[in-house]
Amino acid sequence: MSLAGRAGQRAYAESTFAWLRSAGHAPNVHAYTSLLRAYGSDWRAALSLLDGMQAAGVSPNAHTLSACLAACCRGGTDGAAAAVPLFSTLATSLPVDAHLCATFITLFGRLRDAEGAQRVWAWAGRQGVRVDAHLHCAYLTALMRAGAAQEAAHAFRAMPVPPSAHCYAAGMRALGAAGLPVELVRAVLDDMRVARVPPTPHVYAALMGAFARDGDADGALALLQEGHLQQEGLPAVCTHLAMAACARAGRVADALTLLERLRSARAADVVSFSTAMLAAAVAAAPDEAERLYAQMLADGIRPNDYTFTALIASHGGAARAAASRRDSRSAAACLRRARAVRDRMALARVMPSVHTYNAWIAAAEGAVDDGAALGDYESMRAAGVAPNKHTRALMAIVSRRGAEQITAAQSSLTALSAVAAALAAALIQRGWM
């Protein structure tokens, strides 16, 4: 059962558990724990088994609770929320260890609950739990997931144990998200070398994410080359982040070079093409974005909402450029092309997301068509898509247009942030960024 549980062989674990009962053996805590480990992301079954275990008079231990919590964490926010009451069991009746505390902290990270993660961290300290690298990394990651970048950066600086590569990567992400200069994030890599901790692909991706946020294309390209020399092979996400840095810097040629490298290695995917299209959008080059979109389809890659967001933004950038030249006819034509992307999304069966609506609103705002921007905002609300901070910033520009002067730089920066948010959402995968 133990082997089946660790391998996720639920059917085998359940049949063995049933055989124990039919043979007249009362399952003990080890049998229940092994079965819990086999439940994967089925948090309802895990919680039900835990209740049945206690009803049968078998008390859970730390391993049992950890296995149940792991299933709840894998079950998404619903599973994590259902497991929160189990913290009282830990706090009142079970011996505490670092692994169990890390699992609870991970659970609160899934819920984007920074206060919950901090509560478990403080409680573990009061209980005298020995902090190891795994627990500290779980704490940093949970704070980052909850959007508490400043707190995560502080926790990284106050790290009480020799960090692992995963801790360094989490700390880099925290420092970058907290808005600290990229030089400070880069210095962490130097600290790793002094500590003789070999950098992993996660470390390179975390540092690359800081370069992407700053739009530091030179730093990202140099790091990418260094990473390929130090590692047998970096994952494609590192190249994606380097492309994102090039995109934010408006260096389309460099982004396209990286895309071709991925294509030649047969590693290009929807994020690769969408990121290259974002570079075209920043450079207000809709023809290049359309060429990339056609190439993507020819390569058999299915577009998603990030792809269409970049495509819309490329036409929106051209509309903004035309409006700045006071060429209202060209601006209106570019806006029509941006809005026509909606038909292609329907054919591809891709639903508009908040990022897509933001790109439409940004295109209308750039073309100085406030009526179209308001119409897109109303369509967004009618579709049940909740606005985010970028939507609100764009609508603030539209609503203030008649009352005060909005500089072109302010307007362009807000539009770029709205589109870059879509890219960031595509790259924040498996904790990479």
Image (spheres, grey):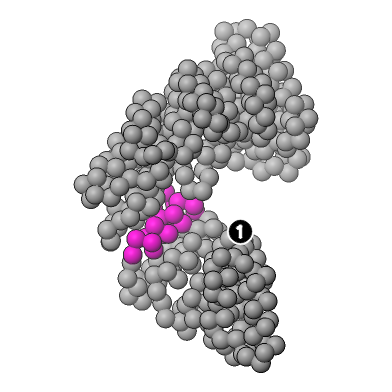
Foreground: 370 or 282?
282
Foreground: 53 or 124?
53
Amino acid found under the numbered disc labelled 1: Gly
Q: Position of residue 123 (x, y in %)?
A: 40, 72
Apparent side of residue 64 relative to residue 215 in the rendered image (left or right):
right
Would you say residue 395 is visible in this rendering? Answer: no
Apparent side of residue 39 relative to residue 63 in the rendered image (left or right):
right
Q: Position of residue 349 (x, y in %)?
A: 76, 35
Would you say residue 347 is visible in this rendering? Answer: yes
Q: Position of residue 243 (x, y in %)?
A: 47, 28
Read off the residue under disc 1. 76
Residue drawn 77% across and 31% down?
Answer: 346
Apparent side of residue 97 relative to residue 369 in the rendered image (left or right):
left
Residue drawn 33% across and 55% down?
Answer: 164
Foreground: 89 or 381?
89
Does residue 104 lie above or below 233 as drawn?
below
Residue drawn 36% across and 53% down?
Answer: 167
Q: Position of residue 366 (x, y in %)?
A: 60, 20
